[in-house]
């Protein structure tokens, strides 16, 4: 793996560049990762491309927001634990401040007729966004027949009511087991021979030699333990002072669990999160779609929608003060765990990259995430584009007779614009909001 390409940056310079990434990071994980590559690799030349790609591959093995973890990892590589905190939090906080302000505006003015009409259009764009995510993940994940079966099985299991964490864990176990079997067959071949049809996850190729870490594994592990304690201290304090039934503890508990099992990015958790939040009376599925639309318009990771959920959970229970506390604890329990994973794993990342079991688990999880996103697409479409839903056992399906046909047409047009023509996301959201206003004025 390549060495650092220029001298190590000062903390103040790293702060400025990380803040720039946090303020300009629109376009979801793909756009944010591309921006980090431009700033840290192309412009500043603090790391080379090979190192950047290795860091990204490692972060994709972790639960939680991979773009924020990549920023944290880069900061750790450049300036140790202080750099990790600067790069990781500066990636999140600008967008978090905007989402907090938008959440307050939403609960204060979202019921106004014209605002509600604009959100009808935004809902169509959100359905198209989930469809785009389904398409992108499908292109990356469905490279083998086994991946197709895992995706189908994950979708079926979720429709039948299987818990989201169980589906992800089962996929990881299947992928690791399959890869070990394939790796054994590869090892049995003649030396130097490699079958062309052997999946990449089973090929035991040697990467570039690893570069030294900025600090020893023991020092990073100490920081991982510290951040593990810091992560759990606020939930523990809430449990001791307010009780485990209090909304703030329930928010902390839910997002802490999701931080440990959410592989595949924000879209992978939304269906499960929406179901859990609705069951607790924090918000409706329609409000979750609105929150996703708000998160899409801000810089930073899409998983900032968790802050919106925490805000509404507090608002529905105790007004603005509790809403601010709910947003804060949701934000903390979403992003603090990422520092644990990076500090614990970064010193050993090179070894993990060469581990066929880890590679196979990641490939299977990616396929399962496709099933998760497919269920999410159906769930969001049913609640955004149809007035009623029908229940068949544990599955919830749209009632075709209750379709809002203009919204169906708008969602289809937005999907074509995003997938076929790669239209600008913010432009699509703005046009859909205007279309919602026009539909309301036309009496549709």
Image (cartoon, rainbow, N blue to C red):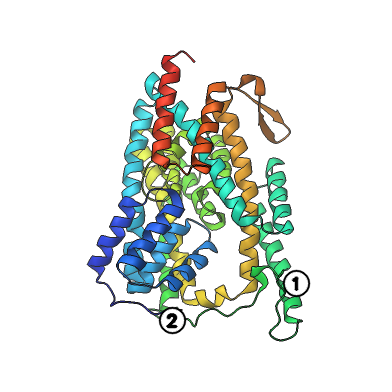
Quarter location, residue 76:
bottom left
Q: Looking at the picture, how far across and down is residue 37, in whole percent?
A: 39, 63
Label 1: which secondary element: helix
In the displayed structure, 27 sits above or below 87; it is above
- Mark toward the start of the polypeptide (1 vs 2): 1
Residue extending furthest toward the bottom: 191
Q: Residue at x 61, y 69 (%)?
A: 358
Label 2: which secondary element: loop
In the displayed structure, 71 sits above or below 355; it is above
Q: Crowdedness of circle 2 by 10 Å Cα count: few (<14), some, many (20+)?
A: few
Residue under circle 2?
211
Q: Are marks 1 and 2 in contact (CB under 8 Å)?
A: no
In the displayed structure, 95 sits above or below 68; it is above
Quarter location, residue 260:
bottom right
Q: Looking at the picture, how far across and down is residue 35, in whole percent?
A: 37, 57
Question: Marks 1 and 2, how far apart in space?
Answer: 31 Å
Q: Nearer the viewer, residue 132 or 372?
A: 132
Q: Nearer the viewer, residue 363 or 417?
A: 417
Quarter location, residue 73:
bottom left
Residue extending furthest toward the front: 421
In the displayed structure, 126 sits above or below 330; it is above
Q: Is residue 424 left or right of residue 133?
A: left
Q: Looking at the picture, how far across and down is residue 64, in whole percent?
A: 50, 56
- Is residue 229 in sight in this rendering? no
Q: Which mark is residue 251?
A: none
Q: Which mark is residue 181?
A: 1
Q: Residue at x 41, y 29 (%)?
A: 433
Q: Residue at x 65, y 66 (%)?
A: 360
- Is residue 183 in sight in this rendering? yes
């Amino acid at each position: 793996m390549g060495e650092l390409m220029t001298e190590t940056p000062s903390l103040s310079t790293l702060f400025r560049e990380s803040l720039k990434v946090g303020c300009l990071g629109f376009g979801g994980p793909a756009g944010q990762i591309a921006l980090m590559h431009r700033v840290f690799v192309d412009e500043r030349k603090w790391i080379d491309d090979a190192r950047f790609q290795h860091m990204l591959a490692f972060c994709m093995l972790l639960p939680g927001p991979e773009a924020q973890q990549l920023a944290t990892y880069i900061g750790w590589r450049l300036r140790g634990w202080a750099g990790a905190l600067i790069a990781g939090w500066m990636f999140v906080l600008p967008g978090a401040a905007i989402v907090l302000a938008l959440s307050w505006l939403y609960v204060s003015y979202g019921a106004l007729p014209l605002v509600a009409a604009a959100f009808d259009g935004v809902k169509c764009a959100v359905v198209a966004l989930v469809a785009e995510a389904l398409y992108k993940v499908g292109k990356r994940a469905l490279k083998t027949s086994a991946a197709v079966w895992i995706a189908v099985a994950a979708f079926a299991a979720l429709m039948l009511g299987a818990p989201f964490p169980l589906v992800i864990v089962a996929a990881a176990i299947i992928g690791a087991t399959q890869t070990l079997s394939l790796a054994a067959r590869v090892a049995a071949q003649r030396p130097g021979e490699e079958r062309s049809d052997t999946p990449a996850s089973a090929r035991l190729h040697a990467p570039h030699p690893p570069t030294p870490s900025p600090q020893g594994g023991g020092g990073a592990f100490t920081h991982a333990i510290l951040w593990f304690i810091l992560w759990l201290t606020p939930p523990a304090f809430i449990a001791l002072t307010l009780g485990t039934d209090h909304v703030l503890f329930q928010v902390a508990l839910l997002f802490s669990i999701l931080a440990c099992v959410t592989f595949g990015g924000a879209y992978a958790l939304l269906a499960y999160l929406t179901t859990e939040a609705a069951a607790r009376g924090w918000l409706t599925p329609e409000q979750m779609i609105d929150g996703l639309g708000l998160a899409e318009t801000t810089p930073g990771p899409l998983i900032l929608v968790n802050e919106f959920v925490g805000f509404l959970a507090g608002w529905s229970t105790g007004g603005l003060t509790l809403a601010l506390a709910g947003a804060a604890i949701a934000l903390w329990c979403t992003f603090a765990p990422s520092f644990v994973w990076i500090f614990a794993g970064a010193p050993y990342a090179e070894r993990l990259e060469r581990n066929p079991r880890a590679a196979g688990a990641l490939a299977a999880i990616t396929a399962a995430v496709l099933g998760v996103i497919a269920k999410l697409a159906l769930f969001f479409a049913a609640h955004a584009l149809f007035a009623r839903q029908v229940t068949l056992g544990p599955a919830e399906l749209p009632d075709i007779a209750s379709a809002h046909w203009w919204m169906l047409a708008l969602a289809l047009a937005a999907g074509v614009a995003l997938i076929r023509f790669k239209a600008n996301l913010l432009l699509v959201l703005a046009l859909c909001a205007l279309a919602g206003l026009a539909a309301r004025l036309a009496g549709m």
